[in-house]
Image (cartoon, helix red, strand yellow):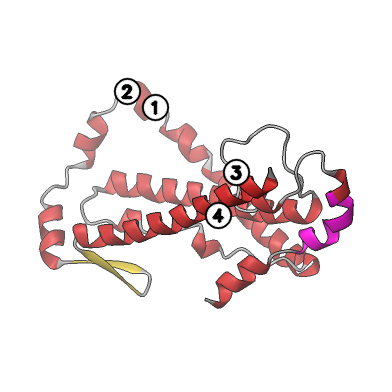
Amino acid sequence: MSGKIDEITQQIKALEIELEAEFRKKQSDFFYKIENSKAIFEEKVINEGKTKIISSLEYLSAFSILTVLTIPFIWAMMIPALLVDISVSVYQHICFPIYKIPKVKRSDYVVMDRFNLFYLDQVEKINCWYCEYFNGVIYYVREIAARTEQFWCPIKHSKNIKDKHSRYDYFFEYGDYAAYRKELEKRRSDFKDLKEKDTI
């Protein structure tokens, strides 16, 4: 049974690599290329895109009054997001070297690039900045939590999880006490794949 699961997992990883390649092809469709981790658009595309910008007032008028009134509640969530961002960063810098877990590179998860897009008005830019920061922090925290879970409790759940984190495939099957007791020390320190990625 586990052999079949491993086979499917490998197929999923292969498809993810293929999907990433397809995303790269999209760059040419929208006339940009990546240089020094930044998207560089063709000048004619920037000029044309700027003609499509709408005013912030026009943008906000597309929403109901009730929707606009929820904005303070959305922005209030920035306080816990900042606290979590700082807290988990301190946590991993203190604990991960002790656990011998590779640190999570924050810039791989908190990617701030959409708010600079030339075809967005000021309110859209602010919205994009908020969303890419907030969701980036969630991705970052999730990866830190996943690596921590592999170290302390690498056991799968009895039920299938809808959206598994990156380390879940390295966990023991639910109820496999024999493998758990036999291989726990080895499994909790098995981050070889991450170290190999860092050297590529």
| Mark 2, secondary structure of its residue | helix
Residue marked by disc 1: 69
Earlier-in-chain disc, 2 versus 3: 2
Q: What x and y, as percent, mark residue 186?
A: 81, 63
Q: Which mark is residue 128?
A: none
**Residue 162: which quarter of the image?**
top right
Earlier-in-chain disc, 3 versus 1: 1
Residue marked by disc 2: 65
| Mark 3, secondary structure of its residue | loop
Label 4 or label 1, whichever lies nearer to me, is 4
Along the line of sight, the residue nearer the viewer: 14 or 78? 14
Mark 2 vs 1: CB contact within 8 A: yes
What's under tag 4, amino acid-wise? Gln
Q: CA distance from mark 3 to mark 1?
A: 35 Å
Q: Residue at x 43, y 50 (%)?
A: 132
Q: CA distance from mark 4 to mark 1?
A: 47 Å
Figure quadrant of the N terminus: top right
Q: Which mark is residue 10?
A: 4
Q: CA distance from mark 2 to mark 3?
A: 38 Å
Mark 4 vs 1: CB contact within 8 A: no
Magenta stretch, residue numbers: 179-189
| Mark 4, secondary structure of its residue | helix
